[in-house]
Amino acid sequence: MEQCLGQPMSWGATGLGKLWDYNLHYFEWLWGLQFEDAKNAIFHWIDKHPFSRNSVGWESYPISLRLMNWLGYWGTVGRWYFEADNFLQEKIWHSVFSQCDWLVRHLEKHLLGNHYFENAVALWIVGSFYEHPSAAKWKSLGSEILNEQLNEQMLYDGMHFERSPMYHSRFVYTLSWLTEIDEALGQFSFGFRDWYTKAIDAAGSVSHPDGKIALFNDSAFDIYPEVECQAQPEGAFSLHDAGYYGFRSSEQDYIIIDAGRVGPDYIPGHAHCDVLSFELSINGNRFITDSGVYNYEVCDSRHYSRSTAAHNTFGPVDHEQAEIWSAFRVGGRPNVEVSDWSPSSGYGFTLKARHDGFERRQCSYARHARRFVFSSDGKLLIEEHFSADDTLEWEGRIHFDPSVTLVEQAKDELFFESHSARMRLAVRGVERISMRKTPYFPKFNVKVERNCFTYFCKAKQGVIQVSMDWGI
């Protein structure tokens, strides 16, 4: 989605939602401008957007990203232009000073997570860019926070602790900046290279063969630069701390399963009800997908994208795995236990896991466990093991990529096609099945309709088998 903001640009509310306003003030778009246009855009912001407590542009997170983009642009692609223009240097310095002065007094300790990390990165980068007593203090403060937060926010398996592939991409991108600047200065102060290498390896695991991320939790395409990972090894992979398990085959088939906690206990705002959900690519193309994210506003689309129904999982009808409300709030959330992870060298894997999300929310003490059996020759078996104290109506959903069409349906078998792939899907142990249309949000503010296969059963307990075969 694109929007013309006029010339000269207006820095007030765009009317397109707060996320649009944030991105306007991040200045990520600066990198696509010629030097004179970039200079004019920055000067216009400085002249026409003075400090205001009520302005999105003066919130700490947009300040942090804007400082990185301003100094990143003039320190790399526009360096010779910047060094030849003393007035440009002075004007930017005075604005940077004002923004950093505000930032150090309003660090986002109340939010923590990626916001607090970006605050620290901005202070460290500004402190590395300028030789000034204040800049030295900013860098020292940024260093102190980075030392603390890198250990807090990177899981042992290399994944960012909020468990969003999109925010992990930003984490990797930011670490690449820190690594390049640190090594260019000859400091090697934090071992940023080691952190970066670990994070980029994890990014490869949560990326489909098309190079784009899996859409678990708050994730959408084209927000942050795609991570350029090395070719990923074939076979099973696991990020035990993040809870991501999967397989990558020589035929460009790829599956990833979310069998982990929804997020950090103290900051689960980017979490979705996607426990035991999965995504699948066949022959390099997406076939089964998550729902993505439409926006961060308090609205029906936001609530749906976070709901159990929006994901490829199973549970009692109209009940949630976690207590979600507002745009980022999460109350009671599930504990997740992986009881079996058995990768078979080069051939496939078995994964069995359970969670207590419905049970903890007193939904007749409903319990759900799921068993995945994946074979690299193009087969996937999913077993739903469920029970409750009372008879409930249970529902499972499989959301297909918009490119996938239903081409044939028999009594208990359905055939789907997309690109060069054909899948046979069969289900056992259910009372009825249906096809419906559901929304897909691959990018912010983008909504696409796609097919969803749904299966139902009314019982106190039982086992349902869903088998998929695309090696046909």
Image: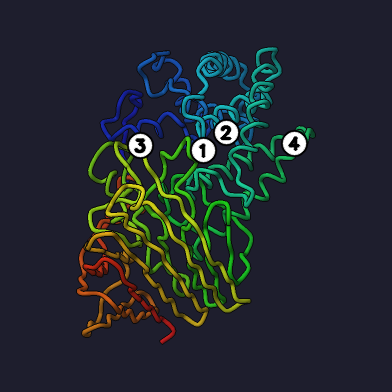
Instruction: Give the answer, above or below, for where 311 lies relative to 417.
Output: above
Q: Which residue is mark 4?
A: 184
Tell me if label 1 and label 4 are in contact, CB under 8 Å. no
| Disc 1 to disc 4, C-alpha distance | 21 Å
Tell me if label 2 and label 1 are in contact, CB under 8 Å. yes
Identify which residue is drawn at 61% across, 57% down. Answer: 229
> Which amino acid does the dot numbered 2 rest on?
Tyr
| Disc 2 to disc 3, C-alpha distance | 36 Å
The residue mark sitting in front, 3 or 1, is 3
The residue mark sitting in front, 2 or 3, is 3
What is the total number of numbered labels drawn onto the structure image?
A: 4
Percent position (x, y) of residue 1? 32, 46
**Label 2 element class:** helix
Percent position (x, y) of residue 465? 35, 76
Q: Which residue is mark 1?
A: 31
> Which amino acid does the dot numbered 4 rest on?
Ala
| Disc 4 to disc 2, C-alpha distance | 16 Å
Q: Quadrant of residue 96?
A: top right
* N-term-proximal mark, 2 vs 3: 2
**Label 1 element class:** helix
Q: Is residue 171 left or right of residue 41?
A: right
| Disc 3 to disc 1, C-alpha distance | 34 Å
* N-term-proximal mark, 1 vs 4: 1
Q: Which residue is mark 3?
A: 329
The residue mark sitting in front, 4 or 3, is 3
